[in-house]
Amino acid sequence: MCPTTLARLSRPAEAPPVLVTSRPLDEYCACFGLTRVELARLPGPVLDCPGGAAALAAEARALGCEVVAADPGYALGPHRLAALAADGRATMAAAIRRDPRRHLPALRRPEKYLRSWDRARRLFTADATAHPDRYVAAALPRLPFADGTFALTLSSYLLFAYPAVFGPVEQLRALRELVRVTAPDGEVRVFPLYDERGRRCPHLTELRAALRHHRIASRVLRTGATGRVLVLRPAHPPRPGYRPAARSERTAPR
């Protein structure tokens, strides 16, 4: 299907605010179908985009996994963004009270789950203050990284969660950019595939067809009983003799 088909799909006229969250590493692993062992074995760095006030970069470092987070909110500084994440925590607490089945992970108690966000927010604030070079103020669909920089790229709670911010055309552009900055033998994982009201993306088939047009292969990975992750790879294998750049070069902005 021609990518211009996506341009004819409608999107809401008004954009809702994007929630700033502070999710811990274990929640990342559960959402994206990853394990700590897999992260530790990656041959290169990970991109978290958008990173928000998450603790992924701080916690993954203990595994020997290098993470670079990208988010326009980093221009505000870590303490201001952490304050916005505290507001996001309050919003999530209210959402859990209204509809725990939708917003609370299975087998988790609300208090314990929200405390994990509090801990992640503290870890983020300390880590972003100590390592500001690992937190890049940038926004999709244009990222300041060289082609093939990251072994794994993760994008959570943005591209499909806010269809008023990212309509079909913007989603395609953002997904292509995420693939661009990912190594030819790496992959991009995007979660969730539903919006803030729990509605699944109605044009995912058309979007995947447009990705194929741009030589990007996609599949939907099941994570648990209800989780779905969009996994992207270049449709062609790495060129013969391809080797990732050294880490000091891979994470350097363009």
Image (tube, rainbow, N blue to C red):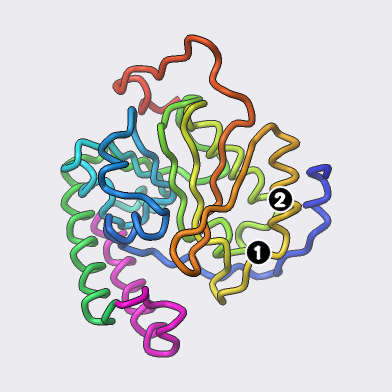
Specify whether residue 84 is painted magenta.
yes
**What x and y, as percent, mark residue 90?**
32, 79
Q: Nearer the viewer, residue 209 or 91?
A: 209
Q: Residues within 10 Å of mark 1 (few under 14, many from 20)?
A: some
Q: What amino acid is found at the position of numbered circle 1 in the picture?
A: Cys
Look at mark 1 in the image and give the residue it sits on: 201
Q: Secondary structure at mark 1?
A: loop
Q: Which residue is labeled 2 in the image?
A: 207
Taking 229 as reference, is 35 left or right? left
Secondary structure mainly formed by the magenta segment: helix
The answer to whether the residues at label 1 and label 2 have Cβ atoms under 8 Å apart is: yes
Where does residue 56 sit, x and y in percent of width and height? 28, 50
Q: Specify the farthest residue to the bottom.
A: 98
Element under disc 2? helix
Residue 245 figure quarter: top left
Quadrant the C terminus occupies: top left
The residue sitting at 27% across, 59% down in the picture is 24
Q: Earlier in the sequence, mark 1 or mark 2?
A: 1
When the figure is inspected, residue 225 is found, relative to residue 246, above or below; the finding is below
What's the amino acid at mark 2? Leu
Residue 97 lies, with reference to residue 249, above or below; the image says: below
Q: Look at the picture and state if 120 lies above or below 136.
A: below
User: Can you name the residue that lies furthest to the top here?
Assistant: 241
The answer to which of 222 and 200 lies nearer the viewer is: 222
Residue 92 is inside the magenta segment? yes
* Range covered by the magenta-colored residues: 78-107
Count of picture labels: 2
**x and y percentages locating residue 156 in the rendered image:** 45, 56
- Relative placement, left or right, of 137 versus 116 is right
**How dense is the environment of label 2, judged by Cα within 10 Å: few (below 14), some, or many (20 and up)?**
many
